[in-house]
Image (cartoon, rainbow, N blue to C red):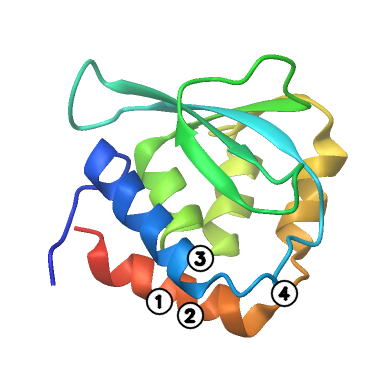
């Protein structure tokens, strides 16, 4: 199985493919959110990646670049982003937030709702497991 570095275009394409393969139309995200991400200390490129997550149309979409009119913007370092998004480690996110490593602008309740979870945990767990498998 091919492995890709987290947040590269190849990784995003492979992660999208996994989500599409698992999407049977029944696993809509529990919360609607439009979030821009600024990820710092990235070990490739110019050291920063701008990305976004959008669940406003009922599907979880993540891609490079920022959206216009996000509900919130989150700035965090690469290692923390990987721990939260790939390793599904909410403790890493909470510790980083308490240490001031995560900065949030906008509607903080959207981020809290996302962390609380919801939706089809079986499909989410399968997607998370497969995304971990493809991530270096």
Which numbered marker is on residue 97?
none
Q: Name the spot of residue 67 as percent of width and height, x first.
A: 61, 20
Marks 1 and 4 sit apart, C-alpha to C-alpha, by 19 Å
**Pointers 1 and 2 in contact (C-beta within 8 Å):** yes
Task: State which mark lies toward you, 1 or 4.
Answer: 4
Q: Earlier in the sequence, mark 3 or mark 1?
A: 3
Q: Name the spot of residue 16 as percent of width and height, x first.
A: 42, 53
Marks 3 and 1 sit apart, C-alpha to C-alpha, by 9 Å
**Which residue lies at the image location 32% right of the left edge and 40% below the top edge?**
7
Q: Earlier in the sequence, mark 1 or mark 4?
A: 4
Q: Which residue is mark 3?
A: 88
Q: Nearer the viewer, residue 53 or 73?
A: 53
Q: Earlier in the sequence, mark 3 or mark 2?
A: 3
Is the residue 99 above or below the residue 123 in the image? Answer: above
Instruction: Say what secondary structure mark 2 lies in.
Output: helix
The total of numbered circles placed on residues is 4
The answer to whether 116 appears left or right of 89 in the picture is right
**Which residue lies at the image location 61% right of the left edge and 85% below the top edge?**
122
Instruction: Say what secondary structure mark 1 lies in.
Output: helix
Within 10 angstroms of label 1, few (less than 14), some, or many (20 or more) residues?
some
Which numbered marker is on residue 129?
1
Which numbered marker is on residue 26?
4
Marks 1 and 2 sit apart, C-alpha to C-alpha, by 5 Å
Within 10 angstroms of label 3, few (less than 14), some, or many (20 or more) residues?
some
Which numbered marker is on residue 126?
2
**Which residue lies at the image location 48% right of the left edge and 54% below the top edge?**
85
The answer to whether 95 appears left or right of 19 in the picture is right
Instruction: Say what secondary structure mark 3 lies in.
Output: loop
Marks 4 and 3 sit apart, C-alpha to C-alpha, by 21 Å
């Amino acid at each position: 199985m091919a492995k890709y570095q987290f947040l590269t275009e190849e990784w995003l394409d492979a992660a999208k493919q996994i989500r599409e393969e698992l999407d049977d139309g029944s696993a809509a995200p529990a919360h609607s959110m439009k979030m821009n991400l600024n990820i710092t200390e990235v070990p490739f490129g110019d050291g920063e990646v701008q990305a976004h997550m959008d669940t406003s149309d009922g599907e979880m979409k993540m891609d490079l670049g920022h959206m216009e009119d996000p509900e919130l913007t989150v700035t965090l370092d690469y290692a923390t982003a990987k721990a939260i998004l790939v390793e599904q480690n909410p403790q890493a996110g909470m510790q980083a937030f308490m240490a001031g490593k995560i900065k949030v602008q906008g509607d903080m309740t959207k981020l809290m709702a996302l962390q609380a979870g919801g939706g089809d945990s079986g499909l989410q767990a399968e997607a998370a497991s497969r995304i971990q498998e493809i991530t270096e």
